[in-house]
Amino acid sequence: GNDVLGSTTPVEFATHLDLLLTQLASPGRQLVMLELPLPPFYHVFGRIQRRLAKKHGVKLVPKRVFLSILAGGDATLDSIHLSQIGQQKMADVVWGIVGAGHVVE
């Protein structure tokens, strides 16, 4: 998300995200990525993220899910960064997406 707020171009963003996902993806590994909550006029970054998530088989958590957690009471420390309550809510959402088929030891 911070790349979008800086000077990163869409081409740079796509190149770096594709490289990162290529390095992380492997058989038996499920990647989960949060859809970026983008400011106006930055939708190209969202399209890139969705395209690359599909290409690499990444489960993408819709931004509306994240935004609904941010809007919840006591979920953030400063309206952006998650509190312990917000972290637990996000963990529950991600676990629901990944599924109980993955055992944490």
Image (cartoon, grey):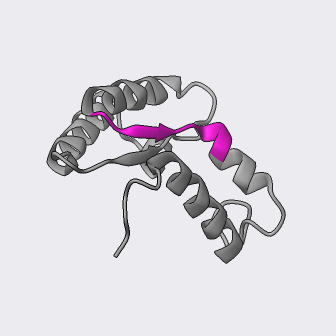
Q: Position of residue 68 (x, y in %)?
A: 74, 47
**Residue 91, located in which quarter of the rendered image?**
bottom right
**Residue that sits furthest to the front in the current view:** 101
**Residue 52, located in which quarter of the rendered image?**
top left
Q: Position of residue 9 (x, y in %)?
A: 35, 33
Name the one closer to the observer, 84 or 102.
Answer: 102
Q: Residue at x 40, y 47 (%)?
A: 32
Q: Residue at x 34, y 76 (%)?
A: 105
> How many tags in the picture?
0
Q: Position of residue 23 (x, y in %)?
A: 15, 48
**Residue that sits furthest to the right in the current view:** 73
Looking at the image, residue 100 lies above or below residue 88: above
Name the one closer to the observer, 51 or 10.
Answer: 51
In the visual, does 88 lie left or right of 22? Answer: right
Which residues fall within the magenta stretch?
57-65
Q: Is residue 102 magenta?
A: no
In the visual, does 56 lie left or right of 33? Answer: left
Q: Is residue 62 magenta?
A: yes
Q: Position of residue 18 (x, y in %)?
A: 23, 36
Q: Residue at x 40, y 32 (%)?
A: 49
Q: Residue at x 41, y 39 (%)?
A: 59
Looking at the image, residue 12 lies above or below residue 6: above
Name the one closer to the observer, 78 or 50.
Answer: 50
